[in-house]
Image (spheres, rainbow, N blue to C red):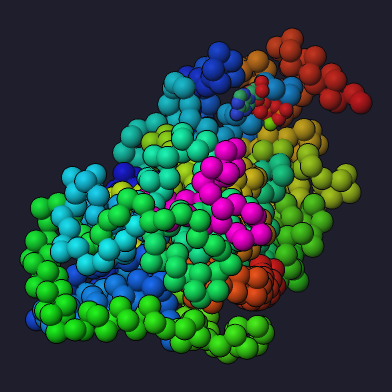
Amino acid sequence: MMKKHTWLKFGTLIVTMLLGLVVFSATNVHADKKEPHYVITTDTTYAPFEFQAQNGQYVGIDMDMLRAIAKREHFTYKLVPIAFNSGAQGVLSGQFDAIIAGMTITPERQQVYDFGTPYYKTGIIAAASPKSGITSLNQLRGKTVALKTGTGSAQYALSIQKKYGFKVTYFNDSNTMYNAVALGNAAVAFEDDPVMKYAIKNGIKLKIITKPANAGQYGFAVKKGQNQELLAKFNAGYAAIKKDGTYDKIVAKYLGAKESTFAGSAKENNSLIGLLKQNKDQFIGGIIKTLQLTVFGIIFATIFGVLIGVLAVVPNKFAYGLSSTIIYIFRGLPLLVLAFFIYIGLPSLTGTKIPAIAAGLITLTLNEGAYIAAFVAGGLKSVDVGQMEAARSLGLPYRKAMLKVIMPQGIKLMIPSFVNQFIITLKDTSILSAIGIIELTQTGTVIISRNSQGFRVWFLVAMMYLIMITLLTFLAKWADKKFGNN
Amino acid sequence: MATKVKVTDLHKSYGDNEVLKGINLEVQENEVVVMIGPSGSGKSTFLRTLNKLEEPTAGSIAIDGIDLTAKETNLNKVRENIGMVFQHFNLFPHLTVLENVTLAPVELGKLTKDEANELGRQLLAQVGLADKADAKPTQLSGGQKQRVAIARALAMKPSIMLFDEPTSALDPEMVGEVLKVMRDLAEDGMTMIVVTHEMGFAKQVADRVVFFADGYIREEGTPDAVFNNPQDPRAQDFLNKVLNV
Ligand SMILES: Nc1ncnc2c1ncn2[C@@H]1O[C@H](COP(=O)(O)OP(=O)(O)OP(=O)(O)O)[C@@H](O)[C@H]1O
Ligand SMILES: [Mg+2]
């Protein structure tokens, strides 16, 4: 039987590993110390306020404004584009210092956020596909309406839902929502006036069917009572750029511009090769992020999984209980829930921010690790008990017997499961797009939000995943041949 | 002569099932004790308590004067001194024959890799398998496997060897080669406790035969006394069956 301190060592190792992850990733975030540094979130896609330009940089009215203000007011910031709803919650949990995302100032939001000077007038409008024949809200009875999660437009739509008798469905980004309506999966979409108009101007095939309702204003927001210094800087900077005409220039630049200015020419958008060329850097960036997540995810999950799996077979009730509980919890939780919990939930508890990439890796480690632990435990249990007895009868201590006799045999049985789990890990990284990691899937979303080439871009992304999975499978088979035979 | 094994009032239960009901046994240095008895009588269980593969429920076991039931006893150290050979060999299938033999002395720091290899080859020669050093266990016949298992146990230089039906899983034509290795060991003065159904081996090699039934030692004596003049009715019945086939 293993001694107590060995368990402690195991436990410490796991904890150190996870902490190391956080620290490792956190160090990447530090910018130079002289100017105050903030983490500011924005929406992934909310043209003309924020969207990714061809070169991969985030542009738009909000983005240019923020850049101008930061320069003037001498602060630096790390921008985290993430689904609007997650970003808004992340500010409240302390994950982000502020949000600028075409966020309408409402009395409800003012309960929990402090808003800066309102910077843009807006209203809520509804749009339908011209093919649908829908021209008024009165035609919506029994039909489905597309809304974006957590937005003022969604709230407005719900407030008139009874009156018009429609059903609702939710989306996390505007572009997917527009496409749902354009393709006829939903009857109309509600969206902020300037955003919808910009999208239509840039080729989204929708027609506006209402006048702007619930006129409101956009504001820059921090958590109530927090980051007041940042808020003051924003207000001062905004006043200055408003006064010297920078603000008007920015607005004119986006509202006056043609689609191709930001999205690339139609010719390039119409061919796969053109799309690949045009978005080469972004695709490469996405693939690298995906591979990083996969490789480190696999390494950490394997270490974690093997440790937890071994705990399940050692003759110690406490270790067994611990292992089964960990497997039960982390195999039972959906990956997305776990990711949100670690990224958005934990910081509100502990008060420390976790970089998305660290949260992503911890998520993969726990979730994939739990699966690995389950089959490691199974594999070790399937090794004949006579092997352990023979090893112990020679005087080998439990740990040596496990390491030199049981594990080599068990792991051989587990190789197919490992290969399988590695492939699943690669695919699961796509779920981490939800916490704002711009890996391959998120790269796809972002590119489409700019050029609306849903079919072609998703086709390219799918091919890239298939190629990566094929390579990973080859690699695993090669490793199995090389190391699995003896 | 020194006492190698001293078992006093040993009990072992699995739940409500009491398998050993108070065993007393002493084994002297160089002695060969053969244990016989009907299936399920507790022979294996008893043998496995001697190196604590099974935890006794009550009673005491002393090996070379070291109390195995005492908390402070280092079991691994005691086990180094007690070789065990299993009915189903339990060779390590992922290692070569030589690695099977050298694993324990190297891992436990008794020998360097080179010393262990030298000893390993010597032991393999002793059991007649010098040419199989680099084979994998799956490439061996049953009799060869069991001889490797014996060499593996000997590599730790034990002073006591336990055998649990070492020939029961073998084809008849391979039984002889394994028994010969055991006989040689006995002649070299190894202290041995052997559970077996090979009555010929018991008669020739044993200093003492112990008859187990229902968790008790029912009869004990020289092979001649036990085989030719058993007192216990269970022993008479058992021997009648196994000797007159
Ligand atoms: N791990 C165990 N759990 C529960 N009962 C067991 C266990 N091991 C042995 N027993 C029981 O203990 C009794 C004695 O078994 P043991 O294997 O010692 O007998 P044996 O004399 O070696 O028989 P055989 O000649 O068949 O090998 C049997 O009734 C058996 O079912
Ligand atoms: Mg038995």
The percent position of residue B220, horizontal first and vertical second, equals: 64, 22
Q: Residue at x 32, y 81 (%)?
A: A252
Q: Residue at x 46, y 87 (%)?
A: A261
Image quadrant assignment for residue A42: bottom left
The percent position of residue A172, horizontal first and vertical second, equals: 46, 56
Q: Is residue B195 above or below residue A477?
A: above
The percent position of residue A457, horizontal first and vertical second, equals: 61, 74
Answer with left or right where residue A387 lies relative to residue A435.
right
Q: Which residue is at the front of the view, A191 or B218? A: A191
Q: Residue furthest top?
A: B233
The percent position of residue B230, horizontal first and vertical second, equals: 73, 16
Q: Is residue A20 above or below residue B161?
A: below
Image quadrant assignment for residue A104: bottom left
Answer with left or right where residue A215 lies relative to residue A475.
left
Q: Residue at x 43, y 26 (%)?
A: B60
Q: Is residue A138 magenta?
A: yes
Q: Is residue B245 above or below residue A90?
A: above
Answer with left or right where residue A201 lies relative to residue B193.
left
Quadrant location, the C terminus of chain B: top right
Q: Is residue A98 magenta?
A: no
Q: Which residue is at the front of the view, B141 or A467? A: A467
Ligand 1's image quarter is top right
Magenta segment boundaries in residue numbering: A124-150
Q: Residue at x 13, y 80 (%)?
A: A243
Q: Is residue A181 visible?
A: yes
